[in-house]
Amino acid sequence: MVFSSHLFIFYFLPLVLLLYYSCPQRGKHLLLTLLSYIFYGWANPYFVFLMMGSTIIDYICGLVISQQYGKKDINDFELLEKGGKRSKAQKWAMIISIVSNLSLLGFFKYFNFGVENYNYLMSMMGVEGWDTFWRITLPLGISFYTFQSMSYSIDIYRGDARPIKNFTDFSCYVAMFPQLVAGPIVRFQEVSEQLRERTHSAEKFARGIAFIALGLTKKVILANPCGKIADSVFDSGSIMFMDAWYGVSAYSFQIYFDFSAYSDMAIGLGLFFGFVFPKNFDSPYRSKSITEFWRRWHLSLSNWLRDYLYIPLGGNKKGNVRTYINLGLVMLLGGLWHGSSWNFIIWGAIHGGMLAFERLQGKDSFYKKLPAVCRIAITFIIVLFAWVFFRAPDLQTSFNYILSMIGLGGSDDATGLIGGLIYQPYYLLSFMLSAVVIWFSPQTWDFTRKITPVRAGWCIVMFVFSLLLLTTQSFNPFIYFIF
């Protein structure tokens, strides 16, 4: 079930809101958890048991870390001392939480990748590989909820958040459907106090409506047409120079509007239930460097990688060489987190290499002496080249596409036909409108801070128009579901 569907907008969401606001305060988390399980299990009910298993393991590990396991009366926990000594049991509970989540993620996300590479190596040696019958279906959102669930154990172990007392409250945190299958990755420390006490207000609800209206607008009016352009170009056998740049630019717009739209709608839905989720995008294509790009793109993931991986590895505290290694390693793992493919690893390597390069150049870099518009353009071009590996189905297609981008691509009799599809007025208008929104319009987060009558009217008009347009679109993917 996706947010930009009639099933969700006209049936599931109204039912959830009716039940939630009719339910007594003590039962709201239980109700929200059950409804979230229905939402998550809509496509495949068996996936719910995986999430339940991860939830139970981390809750028990949290009890051990907080030294409450086995007690009949579980107290309302206090923060553990930061930097304080931890017992063997606490350390083992921390290890079990991390290993179990990473094992769950690793098996379901990378088993097929491992089999494919094993079979490739065996074929090179003339040995028969594994039967291709063994294929694992990737559960929706597993990359997101395992990171969230794991952050609970890490946060309470470090003393960054108070452990949670009620299992239902913790289950609600892990399973909450607004951010369950595609983020933002809400760390426990960010909502721990909200799970204990939060307010429901007309102001939050109104801002939530605005977030959802603008998110749906970005998804339907901008992301979907740009996605159609990108698919047409990337699926072509051979493409011309301008078509290649047009296609990858359209994909960069699609993935931004697709994911930021989902994040906007997730934040808006959270506000309906009294939760304030963190901002997930900060106009990333306005960045003047790759370093700045990762301070603006997918903030919940980049902050998670920084706090739970980069800093524990030593960050920038162990010399320049170690810093460069840490940056590269974190981005390689970030690429692999997105998908089990060498393309994603190369995508991560490009970003990791640029982060290290920019840090090596320092303040004296010629890159930083250029006018702001040039730095933004250069950064965007680097991001575009990296997006090729993110979007293309395999390495060969990626390299062929890049050859087309630098004017060395091949062509055939059908190469020119793609123009008749992608340069239609509707697609050109959507593409240009996307560029205007990306580089000149206010962000959703800022636009919705104060809901004036004019802004409310704009949101209503765009929401209705998006719903009408949605009825005519057959192309409506949420591409981050596959990550």
Image (tube, rainbow, N blue to C red):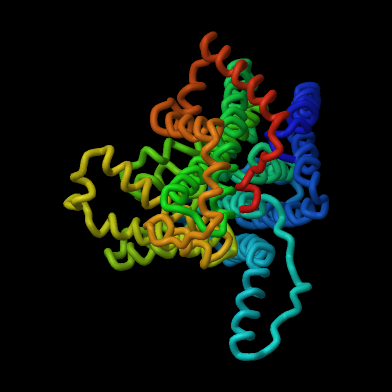
Q: Nearer the viewer, residue 411 or 122?
A: 411
Q: Nearer the viewer, residue 472 or 328?
A: 472
Q: Position of residue 211 (x, y in %)?
A: 58, 26
Q: Position of residue 137 (x, y in %)?
A: 74, 61
Q: How many marks?
A: 0
460 left or right, relative to 34: left
Asked if 281 appears above or below 389 in the picture, the reply is above
Q: Is residue 222 visible?
A: yes
60 left or right, relative to 152: right
- The N terminus appears in which quarter of the rendering? top right
Q: Is residue 66 visible?
A: no
Q: Nearer the viewer, residue 311 or 178?
A: 178
358 left or right, relative to 8: left
The residue lying furthest to the right in this view is 45
Q: Residue at x 28, y 44 (%)?
A: 375
The residue lying furthest to the top in this view is 453
Q: Residue at x 69, y 34 (%)?
A: 473
Asked if 318 appears above or below 268 in the picture, the reply is below
Can you tell which quarter of the image residue 11 is in? top right
Can you tell which quarter of the image residue 135 is in? bottom right
Q: Residue at x 63, y 69 (%)?
A: 113
Q: Position of residue 295 (x, y in %)?
A: 40, 44
Asked if 173 appears above or below 109 in the picture, the reply is above
